[in-house]
C-alpha cells in the first residue's frame, strides 16, 4: 500500500471529529468465511468462489465474490454504522482505501488452518490476522500521528468463524478429526485457538469486537439433504454448534476481564436463526428448508452453479444456496446485531459498542 502524506494526516485527524458527531465507529474490519467474504477468494486457486451469476443478482455491482444474492451481514452493518461497504483486502492497494475498514474474510476459512482443505485455496483466520497486522503497520508507517492507533482502537472488528471447522473438517468424511476428538474436546480445541487469535488482534490494536456465534448448521439445505429424518433439522449437528457457541461465549467473558480496554460482545446467530425458523411468516419468509439456488433434495445436493436460474421470490427464502442465507436474512442478523437486546447481543449491541 502506498503512503499517504499530509492528506492521510488530515483524514486521520478528522476521523475523531466525525465519529464523535455521528456516534459511530471510524472503520469496520471484518474476519470470517464465506458468510461474509466479499471477494478475497476471487483470484485464488480455489473451489470456493462466488464471482459468477446468479450470485450478486440483487447486489448493485452484480457478482463480486459474495456468497449471496445481495448483502452480507457486514454490508448491512457498515450502512448502519454510516460507513461505506468495506473493500476486500485483496483489492485494497493503498492506505487510503482501508481507512474506513477492510474485509479479510475468505470462503472455506476456519479457526484451524487445515479446515476447508477440500476447497484448496483459502485464507485461514491466522493468515487473515497477519493481513490485518500488515494493514495496521502500513497505516502507522504512513503517519506518525497518534490518531492512527486511536482510529484502530475505536473501530469495530467483526469476527465470524467456526462453520468450516465443523462442515469442512469435523463433519467431513475425508477428515479423521472425529476419531481423535470427542465433540466437547473439539469445541475446547477450537475455543482455545480462537482465544489466542482474538488476543492477537487485540495486540495489533483492536479493542471493540463483535464475535458472531455459529448459526443453526443443522438446518442448512446441505445438511438437510443428507439427513435421514426428512423435514427435520439435524439435532446432532446443532448440538456440536451449541457446544462451540457456549464455549466461545464463556471465553469472551474471560477476555473482557483479562484484556485491559477491550470490549467483546457476542452475536447469538444460532438463537436468531431458530427464531426465524420457528415463525418464518412473522419474519416474512415462506420457504425455510431449501436453497433458492441449487440442485437435488432441499436444493442442497449441489450448490448454485454458474448461470443457474434462482428462485423468483428470493425475499421469501431463508436460504440462498446449500450453505448460505439470503440477503433478507443477513439484513435481519445485522439489524439484530446493531439494535438487539441482551438475549441476542451480549453484553451490549453494536450501536452501544460504537459509542464507547
Image (spheres, rainbow, N blue to C red):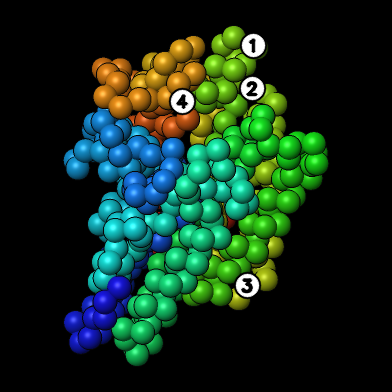
x 31%, y 83%: residue: 142
- Residue 233's image quarter? top right
Find out whether the residues at labels 2 and 1 contact each other: C-beta distance under 8 Å.
yes
Between 345 and 234, the residue placed more toward the observer is 234
Give 131 or 10, whichever is nearer the viewer.
131
Q: Is residue 7 left or right of residue 26?
A: left
Q: Sequence order check: which comes first, mark 4 or mark 1?
A: 1
**Closer to the observer: label 4 or label 1?**
4
- The residue where tag 4 is placed is 322
Mark 1 or mark 2, which is nearer the start of the sequence?
1
Picture disc at residue 234: 2
Q: Residue 199's mark?
A: none
The mark lying in front, picked from 4 and 2, is: 4
Q: Residue 229's mark?
A: 1
Q: Residue at x 28, y 53 (%)?
A: 85
| Sequence order check, earlier mark of 3 and 4 | 3
- The location of residue 259, given as percent across then percent down, is 63, 72
Determine the CA span between mark 4 and mark 2.
Answer: 15 Å
Packing grade of label 2 (10 A; few <14, some 14-19, many >=20) is many
Residue 102 in which image quadrant: bottom left
Amino acid at each position: 500500500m502506498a503512503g499517504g502524506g499530509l492528506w492521510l494526516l488530515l483524514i486521520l485527524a478528522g476521523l475523531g471529529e466525525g465519529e464523535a458527531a455521528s456516534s459511530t465507529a471510524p472503520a469496520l474490519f471484518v474476519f470470517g468465511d464465506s458468510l461474509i467474504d466479499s471477494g478475497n477468494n476471487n483470484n485464488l486457486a480455489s473451489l470456493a468462489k462466488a464471482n459468477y451469476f446468479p450470485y450478486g443478482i440483487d447486489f448493485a455491482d452484480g457478482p463480486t465474490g459474495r456468497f449471496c444474492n445481495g448483502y452480507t451481514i457486514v454490508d448491512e452493518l457498515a450502512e448502519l454504522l454510516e460507513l461505506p461497504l468495506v473493500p476486500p483486502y485483496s483489492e485494497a492497494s493503498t492506505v487510503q482505501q482501508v481507512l474506513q475498514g477492510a474485509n479479510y474474510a475468505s470462503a472455506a476459512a476456519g479457526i484451524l488452518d487445515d479446515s476447508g482443505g477440500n476447497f484448496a485455496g483459502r485464507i485461514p483466520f491466522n493468515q487473515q490476522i497477519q493481513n490485518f497486522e500488515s494493514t495496521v503497520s502500513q497505516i502507522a508507517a504512513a503517519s506518525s500521528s497518534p490518531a492512527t492507533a486511536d482510529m484502530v482502537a475505536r473501530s469495530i472488528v467483526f469476527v465470524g468463524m467456526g462453520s468450516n471447522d465443523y462442515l469442512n473438517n469435523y463433519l467431513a468424511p475425508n477428515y479423521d478429526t472425529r476419531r481423535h476428538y470427542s465433540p466437547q474436546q473439539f469445541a475446547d480445541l477450537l475455543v482455545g485457538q480462537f482465544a489466542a487469535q482474538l488476543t492477537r488482534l487485540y495486540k495489533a490494536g483492536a479493542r471493540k469486537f463483535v464475535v458472531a456465534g455459529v448459526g443453526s448448521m443443522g438446518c442448512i439445505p446441505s445438511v438437510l439433504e443428507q439427513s435421514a429424518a426428512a423435514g427435520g433439522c439435524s439435532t446432532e449437528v446443532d448440538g456440536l454448534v451449541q457446544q462451540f457457541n457456549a464455549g466461545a461465549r464463556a471465553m469472551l467473558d474471560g477476555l473482557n476481564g483479562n484484556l485491559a480496554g477491550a470490549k467483546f460482545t457476542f452475536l447469538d446467530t444460532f438463537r436468531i436463526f431458530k427464531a426465524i425458523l420457528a415463525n418464518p411468516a412473522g419474519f416474512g419468509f415462506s420457504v425455510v428448508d431449501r436453497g433458492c439456488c441449487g440442485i437435488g433434495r432441499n436444493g442442497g445436493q449441489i450448490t448454485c452453479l454458474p448461470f443457474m436460474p434462482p428462485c423468483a421470490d428470493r425475499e421469501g427464502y431463508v436460504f440462498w444456496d446449500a450453505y448460505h442465507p439470503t440477503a433478507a436474512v443477513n439484513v435481519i442478523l445485522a439489524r439484530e446485531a446493531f439494535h438487539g437486546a441482551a438475549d441476542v447481543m451480549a453484553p451490549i449491541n453494536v450501536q452501544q459498542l460504537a459509542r464507547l
